[in-house]
Image (cartoon, rainbow, N blue to C red):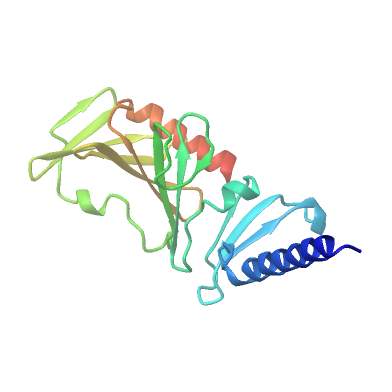
Amino acid sequence: MSSLMRKFLYWLGAGMAFSLFLFFLIPKPRDNPYMKIYSSLNGSDFLGCEFSSEERSGVRFRFDITPEECRFIIYQGGAGVRFYIDYPSLKVVRAGGEKEFPVLFYMERVSMDEFDADRHLAGKKPISVRDGIEVYEFSGSEERKFAGKDGVPVYASDYIETIRASRLYKSGLLVFYQYPKELTDIRAMDDFALDVLRKRVVE
């Protein structure tokens, strides 16, 4: 073997060793420690992901989404979970992504025995009712209340650039969602929110 070939093999081996060193040295992104992904490979009937914490018994969130989308869910072991949904595709997207109309969702479990969605309206009367939408005034700003397609009351308030809405879903899931003000039809946006909950959230 010529000296030139020996030098080539030496430097090739050194380069590979250095590359392996960097591979193990540089920290690699890790999945959320509160996340568990289910697939047909592990014999699960449920395909999607679950978020839960051992410190909060009874708090569990399941999503029927792809593993890639699962990694965009924001859960840190607390009472609630956050995620962004692209309108109108229903895809879970990364926070701060480039989608034109990302809708922010926040969900947490509440006790139905103690929860009263109308508590903040106690003693108040609507200043107007338009197309079944009650309008209430709070310190110069307005809140609108209407019934969603599932018959559940929905509350929507205007902010500078967004509209924020809240509602209950099924048994004890309190849902907040916020979307750009360009999407002006609050009923249509609640229909979209219900679509997200029915197709992406597993109860």
Which corner quadrant of the image does residue 198 belong to? Answer: top right
Q: Position of residue 164 (x, y in %)?
A: 29, 42
Towards the viewer: 48 or 31: 31
Q: Nearer the viewer, residue 158 or 142?
A: 158
Q: Residue furthest right?
A: 1
Name the residue located 28 percent from the left edge and 22 percent from the top edge.
131
Please provide percent x and percent y for residue 91.
54, 38
Along the line of sight, which residue is nearer the eye, 19 or 110?
A: 19
Query: In this rendering, is residue 113 above or below 167?
Result: below
* x and y, in percent, of residue 142 in the image: 16, 38
Any part of residue 99 in sight: yes
Q: Say which residue appears at 33% left-offset and 25% top-offset.
A: 185
Q: Is residue 80 left or right of residue 30?
A: left
In the image, farthest residue toward the front: 3
Residue 34, image x and y in percent?
A: 56, 67
Q: Name the residue at 51% across, 48% down.
A: 170
Q: Is residue 113 above or below residue 191?
A: below
Q: Quadrant of the N terminus?
A: bottom right
Quadrant of res 65: top right
- The one of 1 and 161 positioned closer to us in this rendering: 1
Taking the image as drawn, is residue 149 in sight? no
Residue at 56% x, 53% y is 71
Extreme residue in the left direction: 140
- 137 relative position to 90: left or right: left
Outermost residue, bottom side: 55
> Can you say whether 94 is above or below 148 in the image?
below
Q: Is residue 159 left or right of residue 113?
A: left
Instruction: Judge from the rendering whether residue 16 lies leftward or rightward of residue 75; answer left or right.
Output: right
In the depicted structure, whether residue 133 falls above or below residue 93: above
